[in-house]
Image: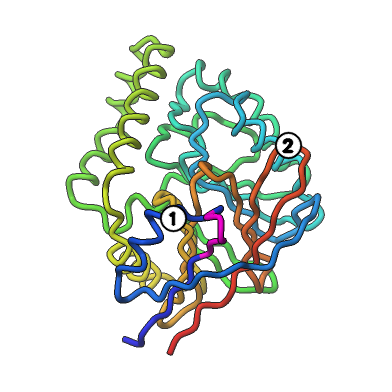
Amino acid sequence: MPKRHFLMETSVNDEVFCIRQRKQLQMLGFLQFNELLIQRDFLEKIRDSVVVVSDIHLTEEGDSRGQLLLDLIARLDTNQVKYFVLLGDIFDFCFGASRYFKKKFRKIGNELEGLCKAGVRVIYLQGNHEFSLNELAWQGVEFVLSKDFQIELEKGPRLSLSHGDRLGAPWHYHIYLAITRSFWFRFAGLMVPQACLDKLCLSISRRSRARSSEVKVPHKKILQNIERWLDLLNTDHGIVGHFHIPYQANHPKKGKMMGLCSWDQPNALGFDGQKFRRYYLKGPGREFIIRLVRPALNG
């Protein structure tokens, strides 16, 4: 297998990547970490053909992240953007079969339906914090409950997208998924007072993230699993969420393997058919900061 050089975006003030994670990457011999100050630019509208967001972990649609998401949706150029992809865990917890959650996130649903009416294909891949999302029944939104989804641009390469939680997952995680995605689990969930279920699951999510922050991230294993996933697909590039890491690596035989940060640093990934761009969101109504993705070189 050819040696791979891996570029991770960062800046001198660690706007993209925290120091602890950066040191972990530097310690891994197969990763060639480069301190890069990527080109910065400003703009009011996003015009890429494909725009992807992931791991926002909204608790309330009116909170700061919810307002940023609504602002981002409103500032997509619907004449240029062909696909808006929500790559999972947009909500910290959502049970789509429940009227409680349909009401709780109705405003976001309305905005996504508006995008669909404007001609943008809205693709929502279910994350591991989300259940029965298809039952939200937002008109025009394409809910994907399977592991991945593929986009083939009219004039451009093919993109494969996955939330990422199932890539290389152990057998017991697949059993957990089979149980929590079953009819009986859905039935039991509807028997619980929904406000109590929401509060309980949000509490579990917070504790889970707190534990995860202390765990060393197995970057080598994650990238190997992404690579194996793409080996099985007729595709050019792969995009994943879930891991909260802005991966940028070359597949030995295909194109790029890209990851997205969580919304601890609000961001989106754009693709215009040739280049990837990362957009960092500073606040509703404010200009986006753009970082062009530099090519990672094989050699």
Residue at image mark 1: 245
The amino acid type found where label 2 is placed reads Pro
Tell me the magenta residue range: 9-14
Which of these two is toward me, 197 or 29?
A: 29
Where does the N terminus fall, quadrant-wise?
bottom left
Q: Can the viewer see residue 8 in this picture?
A: yes
Q: Are marks 1 and 2 in contact (CB under 8 Å)?
A: no
Where does the C terminus fall, quadrant-wise?
bottom left
Which of these two is toward me, 131 or 298?
A: 298
Which of these two is toward me, 200 or 118?
A: 200
Q: Is residue 205 above or below residue 257?
A: above
Residue drawn at point x = 75 percent, y = 48 percent:
76
Q: Position of residue 213 (x, y in %)?
A: 33, 43
Residue at image mark 2: 284
Q: Position of residue 41 (x, y in %)?
A: 75, 61
Residue drawn at point x = 46 percent, y = 63 percent:
247
Taking the magenta stretch, the answer to whether it contains residue 12 is yes
Residue drawn at point x = 29 percent, y = 26 percent:
185
The amino acid type found where label 1 is placed reads Ile
Magenta span dominant secondary structure: loop
Horizontal side of residue 103 vs 216, given as left or right: right
Horizontal side of residue 31 vs 157, given as left or right: left
Taking the magenta stretch, the answer to whether it contains residue 58 is no
